């Protein structure tokens, strides 16, 4: 379980995350939503030790984040940020193999190979696994990064805007994969997402942030409400029920 | 291309070229002399030709490996010990050792040069962090400017203490003075290169960026410092034994990663073969083109390397991706 207690983080005296306390449900897909600058990505980075917060603490399974041994934590939690520009010329398989580093320390054994193949299959990359990253489309590259995180085989998976650069087909595939991870493998997946309808249709739990604070949190049914969304985004919303899914119209 | 670039072919090429290079030189040496156990000729082979070849091979390995490590850590294909001021700082260190401790032993000189090279490279990396322009070309140009500034300080100090003569022998890589008894320090490069192999995966992960490294549970700063330490040590050792061979750490890694990719563990095996092959070719060329005199290896490689660097600049779009 991940618990956040009174997290505060500021840049240049401006509080980007302001006294946020939150408990992330285990084995579920949780989405962070909210307008630009609400502090979603910062909160995710603080949770995943990429950024230090000045106040508050992050507890991973009852233990403070900074007290975790880095290698151990890397087996427990994997994170992928949106700005994953990489200058190294690696093949997909090489990239995914690095996901096994916390487990094998670079000496890939048989079990590692299996996990790498699994991750490649899961993201449907096995046919192009020997292609170099710079030869791929944005969507393929994004899937390759996610495959690396899967190979890490951690209980918690944190992704910052995983649908960035993806067309609708690949967005749906990624969201379905993330959902499957929670349902089939019991993983806890936390994502930052802008597309409110993807959040609505696939999340188990949604946390809406605004101005660095939690505006609302709850299940998809509780959160995807016209009034709630209007107060968060400050534009009129219509929520329609289509095939038992809640779909927002806000154009 | 990869088919022709199998490691065993490269090794074969290296052995053949190395063998040939033993028989190139002013004093004639023929296979027949060696078979007839001519003592003078064997003497020539063992005290001059062999040391020269060994120095060439080890320097080629070391400089090429340190170039690739440098490029991964700085995440820039244009950065090498030559373009990141590492070599110039090492030279300054050498001079300081000469002035400070007089005709001190080679080991002391090497250590002082190493400390300077390390400090200078760290300084350069810190500068890069603070300068907002992250242009891939701008970075090595700043490094070269920094190198020139340090170089002029070195020259000034050398004049002041009247050691220009002594220093100039290290300014440009020259193999004609290599004899058994004065080059053995180059062997130190071998364990350092081995260290590079040992940390290859860690260095590659650091090259993927700090966030990737943290995610995979790696201590980013420690790995970066180990990498820079390897680079600084190799630079210092090579400078003291064969002198400065500019741009080698830029050419070889860029050639090899072009067909082999940037996975350090995979590329290193090729790097340690292609580097020496290239150096031997340059050396044989330098010895034949103005026979019976010779062009120094530093000049030959510097010329080819300069052109290569220029070509890279012009093709930058491809590398920026």
Image: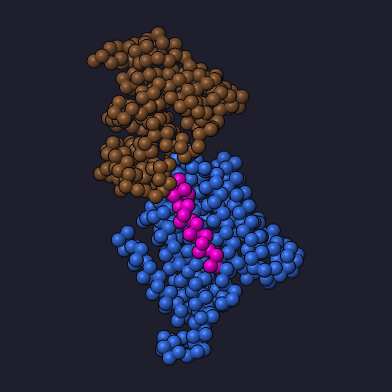
Q: Position of residue B77 (x, y in %)?
A: 47, 52
- Report which colour depicts chain B: blue
A89 lies above or below A39: below
Q: Which one is in front, B226 or A198?
A: B226
Is residue B290 something that shows in the picture? no
Q: Which region of the structure is painted magenta?
A: B186-205
Q: Main secondary structure of the magenta part?
A: helix
Q: Quadrant of the C terminus of chain B?
A: top left
Residue at 57% across / 68% down in the picture? B185
- Residue A121 appears left or right of B266: left
Q: Position of residue A119 (x, y in %)?
A: 31, 39
Q: Quadrant of residue A202?
A: top left
Q: Residue at x 50, y 34 (%)?
A: A68
Most distant residue in the right direction: B160
Task: Tell which residue pokes out farthest to the top in this image.
Answer: A227
Q: Which chain is brown?
A: A
Direction front: furthest residue: A62
Question: Does the rendering let one see residue A66?
Answer: yes
Q: Is residue A134 left or right of residue B191?
A: left
Of residue B239 and residue B112, the one placed in the foreground of this image is: B112
Residue A15 in the image: x percent, y percent?
57, 22
- The verdict on residue B201 being magenta is yes
Q: Is residue B169 left or right of residue A198?
A: right
């Amino acid at each position: 379980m991940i618990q956040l207690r009174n997290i505060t983080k500021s840049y240049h005296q401006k509080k980007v995350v302001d006294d946020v306390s939150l408990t992330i449900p285990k084995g579920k897909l949780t989405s962070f939503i909210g307008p630009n600058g609400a502090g979603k990505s910062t909160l995710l980075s603080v949770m995943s030790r990429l950024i230090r917060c000045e106040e508050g603490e992050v507890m991973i399974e009852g233990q403070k984040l900074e007290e975790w041994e880095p290698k151990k934590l890397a087996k427990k939690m994997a994170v992928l940020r949106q700005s994953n520009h990489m200058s190294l010329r690696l093949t997909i398989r090489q990239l995914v193999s690095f996901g096994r580093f916390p487990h094998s320390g670079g000496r890939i054994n048989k079990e590692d190979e299996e996990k790498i193949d699994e991750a490649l299959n899961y993201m449907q990359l096995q046919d192009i696994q020997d292609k170099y990253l710079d030869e791929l489309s944005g969507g393929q590259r994004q899937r390759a990064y996610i495959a690396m995180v899967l190979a890490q085989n951690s209980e918690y998976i944190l992704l910052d805007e995983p649908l960035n650069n993806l067309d609708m087909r690949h967005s749906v595939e990624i969201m379905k994969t993330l959902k499957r991870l929670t349902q089939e493998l019991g993983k806890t997946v936390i994502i930052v997402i802008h597309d409110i309808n993807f959040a609505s249709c696939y999340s188990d739990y949604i946390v809406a942030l605004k101005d660095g604070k939690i505006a609302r949190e709850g299940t998809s049914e509780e959160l995807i409400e016209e009034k709630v969304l209007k107060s968060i985004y400050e534009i009129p919303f219509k929520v329609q029920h289509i095939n038992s899914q809640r779909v927002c119209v806000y154009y | 291309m990869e088919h022709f670039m199998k490691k065993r072919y490269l090794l074969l090429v290296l052995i053949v070229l190395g063998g040939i290079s033993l028989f190139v030189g002013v004093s004639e040496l023929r296979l027949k002399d060696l078979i007839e156990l001519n003592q003078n000729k064997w003497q020539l082979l063992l005290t001059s030709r062999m040391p020269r070849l060994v120095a060439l091979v080890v320097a080629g390995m070391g400089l090429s490996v340190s170039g690739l490590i440098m490029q991964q850590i700085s995440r820039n294909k244009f950065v090498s010990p030559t373009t990141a001021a590492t070599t110039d700082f090492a030279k300054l260190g050498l001079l300081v050792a000469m002035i400070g401790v007089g005709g001190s032993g080679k080991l002391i000189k090497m250590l002082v040069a190493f400390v300077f090279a390390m400090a200078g490279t760290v300084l350069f990396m810190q500068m890069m962090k603070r300068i907002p322009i992250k242009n891939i070309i701008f970075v090595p140009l700043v490094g070269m400017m920094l190198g020139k500034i340090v170089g002029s300080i070195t020259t000034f100090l050398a004049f002041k203490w009247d050691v220009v003569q002594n220093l100039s022998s290290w300014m440009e890589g020259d193999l004609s003075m290599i004899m058994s008894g004065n080059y053995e320090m180059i062997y130190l490069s071998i364990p350092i290169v081995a260290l590079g192999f040992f940390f290859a995966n860690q260095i590659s992960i650091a090259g993927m960026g700090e966030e990737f490294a943290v995610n995979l549970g790696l201590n980013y700063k420690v790995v970066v410092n180990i990498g820079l330490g390897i680079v600084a040590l190799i630079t210092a050792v090579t400078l003291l034994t064969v002198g400065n061979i500019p741009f080698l750490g830029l050419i070889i890694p860029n050639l090899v990663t072009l067909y082999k990719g940037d996975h350090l563990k995979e590329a290193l095996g090729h790097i340690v073969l292609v580097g020496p092959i290239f150096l031997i070719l340059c050396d044989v060329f330098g010895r034949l083109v103005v026979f019976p005199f010779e062009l120094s290896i530093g000049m030959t490689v510097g010329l080819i390397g300069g052109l290569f660097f220029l070509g890279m600049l012009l093709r930058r779009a491809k590398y920026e991706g």
